[in-house]
Amino acid sequence: MKELCLLTIGELSGPIRKKELSPLEVTKSVLERIDRLEKGLNAYITVRRDEALKAAQEAEKAILAGNYLGPLHGIPIALKDLFATKGVRTTGGSKIFADWIPPYDATVVEKLKNGGAIIIGKANLHEFAYGPTTINPHYGTTRNPWDRERISGGSSGGSAAAVAASLCSAALGSDTGGSIRLPAALCGIVGLKPTYGRVSRFGVMPLSWSLDHAGPMTKSVEDAALVLNAIAGWDAKDPASSTAPVPDFTQALNAQVKGLKVGVLKEYLAEPMDAEVYEAVKKALATLESLGATVAEISVPRVKYDISISTTILFAEATAYHEPYLKTRPQDYGADVRARLQLGYFFLATHYLRAQRVRRLLNADFQAAFTKADVLITPTVPIAAPKIGEDTVELGGRVKDTRSALVRFTRLFNLIGGPAISVPCGFTAAGLPIGLQIVGRPWDEATVLRVAHAYEVHAGWRQRQPSMA
Amino acid sequence: MTGERQPVSPGALRQVAALAGLALSEAELEQLAPQVEIVLEGLRRLEELDLQDVEPATIHPLPKE
């Protein structure tokens, strides 16, 4: 019988609801696995052993008394240590907030707790979410469960590694330029960036106000839908929060894509990428075609401006947020994050506004693109997980900066704000995961989840687990 | 306005940093200069686009009540 920590939320919640399985046994299983494996992975900054066991006991009591709160009741969830958690150290992966104990929960944390989830711990991240590797100078590097000499990606690297290694049943991450999707791809799990405004950002330390998103990182697409159900919805405390109605996202999981129009972003498919990534994505498209979807190339020429726009907006907004600390405690930042924050001072307000005007053009371009396709597909990351400390990679015969390569295909979709998910779509010959990115119209998480689920069920990559010997 | 592109100098960055109240060492300025140039190059490419009548995505419609 499979260890409880290896099961998905979908596999756990039924037996928990029917009182056939105790949340305490699930939490103990996860904590035992953390005891065995966490040292080699460094996925967590804080593990809440005693508190989690206590919460699991309370969940057990409540469920036995007939007070079942829903599919997340009794499920151990990790939180990226960017999410304010009442009474629990919340560091932002930084020295600056090393001792901060918030007096409140982030809205999404409150929602998880109200749904009976067990907060198992606070996951490691790239300092202040401002990087794609989770090589953290203050809390150490999070290692990839598939190859511990390689990065887990970032910035939600701890969350990704914890889910991939079953050190939690699911996790929350944040995504400003790919920080849910790219570590999900590198660690072989599912990561969903919802539509901007779908999930409250209140209590999530900002990196870039107009690019930040919070979302689920899970073992399966079904689990992503279950967590999204719990955390989505309007929040008065988040000025970007939308009153858009929240459907039951699990209703979309019917494994049917017949008649759906899948667009392949021509400009991204022409970008340099590892041959194995290209082949895996082509095979995934063939799978979707075999399931009855039509696949066609879609061209959005102004995509070529995506990195310039994204960089300008990100630099300005991140530096503005960090200004008080950057000026008084620059030495307490890691060198890479400090340099990026300093860069934000050297661009003008007119540069920022130019970028925001081109952003509006891109939004219109994608509105038009989505009249020809129901979803767009790209690789999530052009490479598999690089080795720790590998600052450059070879792509298309040229040497590229690793950090830039990692976020090449993800940053655009923070600009245009629609839902985007990464699902596993294969492995390299070296056994490293490859991710497929599926992007939808704003507010159409349902179609994104539907396509992702159909692919996941038919492709079968989810069954492969990292060998954690 | 077109003209020959001038590389960003540590001196220019020093002036901007002073305006921003940011204390940077010479080594930091030298390290930052090429990175600033890369971003400015990308911004120059945005000048190719006709942005007449295009408002920034920062516009904030007010709530109904």
Image: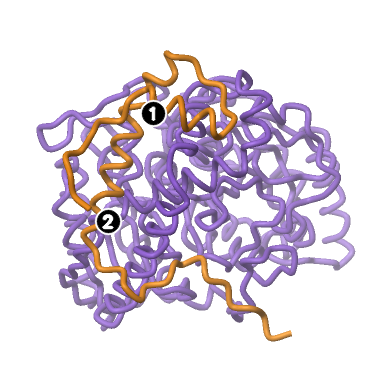
Chain colours: A purple, B orange
Residue B64 position within the rendered picture, expressed as x and y whole percent measured from the top left? 68, 86
Q: Residue at x 87, y 59 (%)?
A: A62
Circle 1: element type: helix
Residue type, numbered disc 1: Ala
Residue A303 position within the rendered picture, expressed as x and y whole percent measured from the top left? 25, 60
- Measure the alpha-carbon separation of dots 2 and 1: 22 Å
Q: Earlier in the sequence, mark 2 or mark 1?
A: 1
Residue A110 makes an appearance in the image: yes
For label 1, the crowd category at 10 Å Cα-Cα, with few meaning under 14, some 14 to 19 and many 20 or more, is few
Residue A109 position within the rendered picture, expressed as x and y whole percent measured from the top left? 73, 53
The disc numbered 1 marks a residue on which chain? B
Quarter of the figure with residue A159: top right
Which image quarter holds the N terminus of chain A?
top right
| Disc on res. A155 | none
Residue A209 sits above or below residue A336 on the image:
below
For label 2, the crowd category at 10 Å Cα-Cα, with few meaning under 14, some 14 to 19 and many 20 or more, is many
Residue tagged by mark 2? B46
Q: Residue at x 60, y 56 (%)?
A: A9
